[in-house]
Image (cartoon, grey):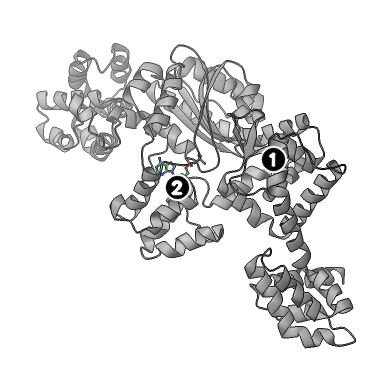
């Protein structure tokens, strides 16, 4: 029964209980087919008129819109006109027109099924992705006849959960494939005890709903172990909710998925494509692209600021380009712009500077900032794989590499490298271009930015590592095969070497030692001579430090460089390294 009708019944309950004679009304309701003979008997068995009335109302509250209408008509026919008028304003519409009247395309029935199953509503600002949604629906239709799994996978913030909720917002799909309902469970990263609690509450929800429909079924005590919970869920899905769909949102771990391997129909969202390998039954999958089309992303921004996409300032396109249309980031920025509509340039700049922490805004979904979402993805890698993943920081933006390049960096066989990369690809942390053989791998820009931000202090030494590893592998001379790997070295070895030079010249230790032995003039000369290769901003910071402190660095005894460097502006790389060293000294005592 729809919400408004149920609420009206609850509000009018005591007046109705006072006055109605259930036995008169029930005849009408039986002939309308909304009440069974058994139900009538149970109500008649109550000793007093008032108790019978209360029992009828209790039963009615668990029924659908038709029962409400039948009850209303019965009141009118039995001359309870004043009571009928209490219910009149909330009479539900059940005509086909009314069924289609929802702005999100769902019907009242769909809305009732989804809200009962805990499926999240559409985000307030929403754009549809019809091709993607049709792909998910098509896979769901395969579950019409038999149980199985549909995996929706993609990187953090690509819109998987929104898509899963949207895919089931469809009258025909629910009535034809999942008449038993759609049940949503948010999973996320869990340990075994958390998982037990989640399944307990799912079982409780399912049992409670089934008891409302059939009061003779009883509520059980919560299952005490994961095994028991799995069996309880199996029983519920098989007996009470046949042909229903379970949506498991944001699954990270195959052991979690195994708890749901109970021969039912499951739609799961995950970043890890291979997760369903560990469970039995038919499986299919849909990949969610990480970014929206440009016009869809602009539409989101326009909706947030209540404007038209064509009227957005020029920075809007740059924002979309900068984050490659990531729905999460576009929505986060849109939400910020709603509050500060003049800040287009500022947020574009923030995004370009990779200051993700400032693009923080609570969202209706799990992650309130991209950095958290990415960090969570990386956390679940094994320690060894995590280190290797961080090594990918060394790649240039928009460059695709074959596994052999990384086999030089990690000194592993290409097959072993493929295995490591497969893990990243499965977790949507890395992308694979399958149009080339051997495959080429690349990171999403946002992932690379995130890695660079996370690994700021280690980046230069990573370039050194690349150069060393290359020199070791090709000590006899450069590769000549002309394959993708060979081409990589010819294009990027110089880049890594230039970065290596940065790593040397932007090191406070190097500055200290060289100044002590050769004097500051030599150092300043280096920055000028190799200026074109070095990062302009950081070079400026080192030059400034040297020109301000040159006279001190001539002195003997030689001054404490860390102390001198600590008086640099705190945005300076010189200051950052000095601070680290000072902290290290403090911990060493
Ligand atoms: P995922 O499950 O892939 O991590 P979500 O589905 O939770 O991603 O989406 C992340 C955020 O992106 C949502 O909170 C929402 O703000 C935004 N978003 C995703 N899809 C859409 C869409 N179709 N229209 C508008 N915003 C969307």
Q: How far across and down, in percent of the image, does residue 50 sit?
A: 26, 29
Q: How far across and down, in percent of the image, does residue 555 sit?
A: 85, 88
Q: Quadrant of ligand 1?
A: top left
Q: Is mark 2 within 8 Å of ligand 1?
A: yes
Q: CA distance from mark 1 to mark 2?
A: 46 Å
As helix, strand or loop, the secondary structure at mark 2 comes to: loop
Q: Give me the residue at 30% from left, 27% from top.
A: 109
Would you say 102 lies left or right of 366 here?
left
Q: Is residue 546 above or below residue 210?
A: below
Q: Is residue 193 above or below residue 463?
A: above
Q: Nearer the viewer, residue 182 or 510?
A: 510
The label shown at residue 368 is none
Image quadrant where residue 527 sits: bottom right
Q: Which residue is mark 2?
A: 364
Q: Which residue is mark 1?
A: 487
Image quadrant where residue 62 sits: top left
Q: How far across and down, in percent of the image, does residue 342 sit?
A: 37, 65
Q: Nearer the viewer, residue 545 or 50?
A: 545
How would you rate the neighbour count of disc 2 (Cα within 10 Å): few for under 14, some for 14-19, many for 20 or more? few
Closer to the observer: label 1 or label 2?
A: 1
Q: Nearer the viewer, residue 385 or 265?
A: 385
- Is any part of residue 259 visible from this angle? no
How would you rate the neighbour count of disc 1 (Cα within 10 Å): few for under 14, some for 14-19, many for 20 or more? some
Quadrant where the C terminus lies? bottom right
Would you say 209 lies left or right of 380 here?
left
């Amino acid at each position: 029964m729809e919400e408004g009708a149920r609420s009206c019944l609850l509000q009018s309950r005591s007046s109705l209980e006072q006055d109605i004679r259930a036995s008169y009304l029930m005849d009408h309701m039986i002939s309308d087919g909304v009440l069974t003979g058994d139900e009538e008997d149970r109500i008649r068995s109550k000793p007093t008129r008032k108790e019978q009335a209360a029992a009828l109302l209790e039963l009615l509250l668990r029924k659908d819109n038709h029962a409400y209408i039948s009850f209303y008509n019965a009141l009118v026919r039995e001359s309870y006109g004043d009571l009928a008028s209490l219910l009149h304003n909330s009479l539900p519409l059940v005509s086909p027109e009314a069924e289609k009247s929802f702005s999100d395309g769902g019907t009242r029935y769909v809305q009732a099924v989804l809200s009962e199953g805990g499926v999240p509503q559409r985000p307030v600002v929403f754009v549809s992705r019809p091709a993607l949604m049709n792909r998910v629906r098509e896979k769901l239709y395969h579950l019409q006849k038999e149980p199985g799994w549909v995996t929706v996978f993609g990187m953090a913030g690509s819109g998987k959960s929104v898509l899963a909720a949207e895919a089931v917002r469809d009258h025909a799909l629910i009535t034809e494939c999942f008449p038993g309902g759609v049940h949503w469970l948010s999973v996320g990263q869990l340990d075994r005890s958390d998982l037990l609690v989640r399944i307990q509450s799912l079982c409780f929800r399912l049992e409670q709903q089934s008891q409302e429909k059939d009061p003779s079924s009883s509520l059980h005590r919560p299952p005490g172990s994961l095994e028991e919970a799995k069996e309880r869920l199996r029983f519920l899905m098989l007996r009470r909710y046949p042909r229903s769909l379970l949506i498991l949102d944001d699954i990270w771990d195959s052991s979690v998925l195994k708890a749901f391997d109970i021969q039912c129909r499951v739609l799961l969202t995950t970043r890890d494509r291979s997760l369903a390998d560990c469970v039995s039954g038919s499986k299919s999958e849909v990949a969610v692209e990480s970014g929206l089309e440009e016009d869809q992303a602009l539409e989101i921004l326009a909706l947030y600021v209540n404007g038209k996409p064509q009227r957005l300032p020029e920075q809007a396109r740059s924002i979309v380009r900068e984050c490659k249309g990531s729905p999460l980031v576009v929505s986060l920025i849109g939400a910020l712009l709603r509050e500060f509509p003049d800040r287009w340039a500022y947020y574009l700049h923030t995004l370009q500077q990779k200051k993700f922490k400032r693009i923080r805004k609570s969202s209706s979904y799990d992650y309130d900032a991209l950095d958290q979402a990415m960090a969570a993805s990386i956390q679940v890698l094994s320690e060894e794989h995590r280190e290797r993943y961080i090594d990918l920081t060394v790649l240039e933006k928009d460059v695709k590499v074959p596994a052999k390049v990384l086999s030089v960096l990690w000194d592993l066989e290409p097959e072993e490298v493929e295995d490591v990369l497969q893990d990243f690809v499965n977790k949507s942390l890395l992308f694979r271009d399958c149009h080339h053989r051997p495959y080429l791998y690349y990171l999403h820009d946002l992932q690379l930015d995130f890695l660079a931000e996370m690994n700021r202090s280690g980046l230069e030494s990573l370039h050194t590592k690349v150069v060393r590893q290359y020199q070791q592998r090709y000590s006899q001379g450069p590769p000549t095969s002309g394959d993708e790997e060979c081409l990589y070295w010819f294009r990027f070895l110089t880049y890594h070497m230039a970065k290596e030079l940065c790593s040397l010249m932007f090191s406070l230790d190097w500055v200290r030692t060289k100044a002590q032995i050769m004097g500051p003039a030599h150092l300043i000369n280096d920055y000028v001579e190799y200026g074109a290769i070095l990062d302009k901003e950081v070079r400026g910071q080192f030059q400034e430090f040297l020109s301000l402190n040159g006279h001190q660095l001539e002195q003997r005894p030689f001054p404490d460089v860390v102390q001198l460097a600590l008086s640099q502006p705190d945005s300076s790389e010189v200051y950052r390294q000095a601070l680290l060293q000072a902290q290290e000294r403090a911990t060493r005592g």
